[in-house]
Image (spheres, rainbow, N blue to C red):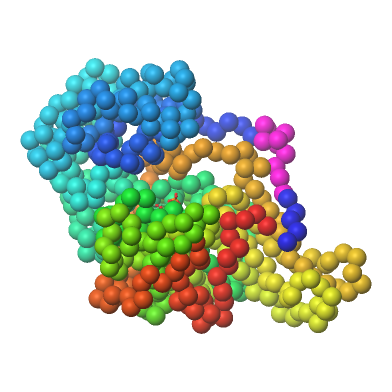
Amino acid sequence: MATVQMSVRPEDLSKVPAGKERIPEPAILVIFGASGDLTKRKLLPALFHLEQSGLLPEKLAIVGVARRALGGEFAEDMRRDIVQFGSVDAGDPKLDKFVKELGYFALNFDDPASYTGLKEELDRIDKEKGIGGNRMFYLATAPEFFAGIIENLGAQGMAQPEHGLARIVIEKPFGHDLASARELNHQVNAVFQESQVFRIDHYLGKETVQNILVFRFANGIFEPVWNRNYIDHVQITAAETLGIEGRGPFYEKAGALRDVVQNHMMELLSFVAMEPPSSFEAESVRREKLKVWQAIPSIPILNAVRGQYGPGIVEGQHVAGYRDEERVSPESGTETYAAVRLQIENWRWAGVPFFLRAGKRLKRRATEISIQFKQPPLLIFDRMQLTSPCQEIQPNLLTIRIQPDEGIALRFGAKVPTTPNMDVCPVNMDFDYAAAFGTSSANGYERLLLDAMLGDQTLFSHRDGVETTWALYTPILEAWAAKKPEVFPNYFAGSWGPECSDHLLEKAGHSWRNDLGRKA
Ligand code: BG6
């Protein structure tokens, strides 16, 4: 397919004034689960990137909290991890200072008494650095500890301090079904007010996800066609080549629907489908997202399919099937692939099917949104195809590549030159993020950590939002739990998923786009 490259001229970029810097107030950031994967792979590298960019307050103390007695080892481990996972130069002069300031406190999450010690330690650091009482607690532990930590913070008066502000950031998964999400919301809101709570979904920290809103609402030409009159259907794919990366016990209980569809994919869906908010304030954005989710009628079980990978070849390597992964049951019924068809019953979208799919060990890594437009009402060229290399006139397709190859492409038909006929071939106008702006090392957490420190909840989930999305998926999870799949595994690692998923679209007269992740 031919490509027309659109690019931003470097001279235009240099004219953009530097953004107004938003520096948070002094605070102590307390990370529960400091010895875990998330802290070393994402949180500390993101915090150091913020430090490099000069976006952290002068007076910021970071204290890792975990069960193991680590002491000084913690800072040294983090230095290594920041270099490795943050692609940071080990000789960066800012790194020494940053690492030297990292604190650690060993604590048994379930033991109320040890929170007295934590409070004293935080007060001591506060006094020493003159912080003024602000605290941000980050829950990066296994989810079963969330409620206990929150309760203990409340009991010690750390959630509603006399001086300064307290905020709490809660990692996903937020509950494992509707009832547990409601209960967790109840526990959180018994201790923290909603304005103090930041439920994180790292997809919202991705530039390309935020760019969906910019694309839709900072440009005048797309909004008029962004509706049922022009759009035929929408596909949203989150395809991974990775397997479960040693997370057997977690994944066995989660599965693809809980792990990715209920949260990341529903966030993407809401950005694609929401009405223009009145401003980019948390209240307005969250309200519009919620209205989208509330307009989705319950999903018939026949419109949800699941799969599990068997052995296969991914990116040229032989890989094991899911049931042979470490700490996974050899008879596991957990889905590593899920796809659903849903409708949004409002004036903008009534009648437009939305297809969502997420899976592990698929052919290619690609998170993409495809908006397929309707064909023109009359195809005057369709009988003149005999000599054309293109079999049929294809409808316009807008693809938003969230990752990798971040960008946006618009497919349209163009006359094939030099042939005597009016032959039509699809071509692409392609905006490529890296070519236009250079690559960004941000992993999404930079933006979200900064926003949480600034108290900006726009890119965080509200309690009503998580409950509404769980309400949609809980009946499917229950139906799946009640009936073990007959044929698992049902797709080869390295394929595009199970056949039942293709049938889901065929029933609606469509097919999955499998030319993802490639610049046209
Ligand atoms: C996480 C899931 O939330 O998102 C993982 O738990 C998944 O299973 C990951 O691999 C995908 O995130 P990203 O940013 O790599 O698309």
Vertical order, 360 against 512 (above or below): above
Vertical order, 312 against 130 (above or below): below
User: Can you tell which quarter of the image residue 420 is in?
Assistant: bottom right
User: Can you tell which quarter of the image residue 301 is in?
Assistant: bottom left
Q: Which residue does the image show at 24% across and 50% down from the upper left?
A: 143
How far across and down, in percent of the image, does residue 287 sit? 40, 58
Which residue occupies the foreground of this view, 440 or 320?
320
Q: Is residue 196 left or right of residue 266?
A: left
Image quarter (top left, top right, bottom left or bottom right) of the C terminus: bottom right
Which residue occupies the foreground of this view, 32 or 220?
32
How far across and down, in percent of the image, does residue 102 sit? 30, 25
Q: Which residue does the image show at 28% across and 49% down from the upper left?
A: 194
Image quarter (top left, top right, bottom left or bottom right) of the N terminus: bottom right
Which residue occupies the foreground of this view, 110 or 456?
110
Q: Magenta stretch containing residue 23, yes or no?
A: no
| Stretch in magenta | 6-15
